[in-house]
Image (cartoon, rainbow, N blue to C red):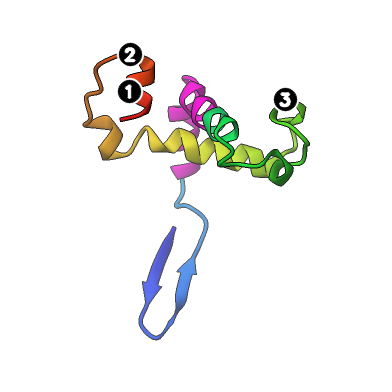
Amino acid sequence: MCAPRARAPTACSRPGPGLDDQANKLAGGGHCYGFSLVSLKFFDKLLSPLDYGGPSPRGLTLQGNLALQRRLAEAWAVQMSPQVLLADYLGTPTRCSTS
């Protein structure tokens, strides 16, 4: 968590007690959204597998790859944003992904 300070750099600290556990419980039901979003970004060349330790997305490993784990967690968290939760996308997957 980060908090701005007057006339000082922003101060960041570890999440409050229980926040990590709460986030892990929420993510425990699946990771499809995060994997899908990251996969699409690799496909569209918006992410480079070189930044995650491999020459291609298929060559990446998840275990021990903190950068990739972090990217997947960030992508998963997007689905919890109000813009996604409140949005109704109707149509084919192709139409929804280009909206």
Query: How much space separates mark 3 and mark 1, taking CA atoms?
Result: 26 Å
Label 3 sits on a secondary structure element that is helix
Q: Quadrant of the N terminus?
A: bottom left
Q: Is residue 22 at all visible to an observer of this figure?
A: no
The picture quadrant where one finds residue 82 is top left
Asked if disc 2 and disc 1 are in contact, CB closer than 8 Å, the reply is yes
| Residue 72, image x, y percentages | 56, 35
Query: How much space separates mark 2 and mark 3, taking CA atoms?
Result: 27 Å
Q: Which residues are magenta?
A: 19-37
Q: Which mark is residue 92?
A: 2
Query: What is the total number of numbered labels drawn onto the structure image?
Result: 3
The residue where tag 1 is placed is 96
Q: Residue at x 39, y 86 (%)?
A: 7
Q: Is residue 63 above or below residue 71?
A: above
Q: Is residue 1 at all visible to an observer of this figure?
A: yes
Q: Residue at x 50, y 24 (%)?
A: 28
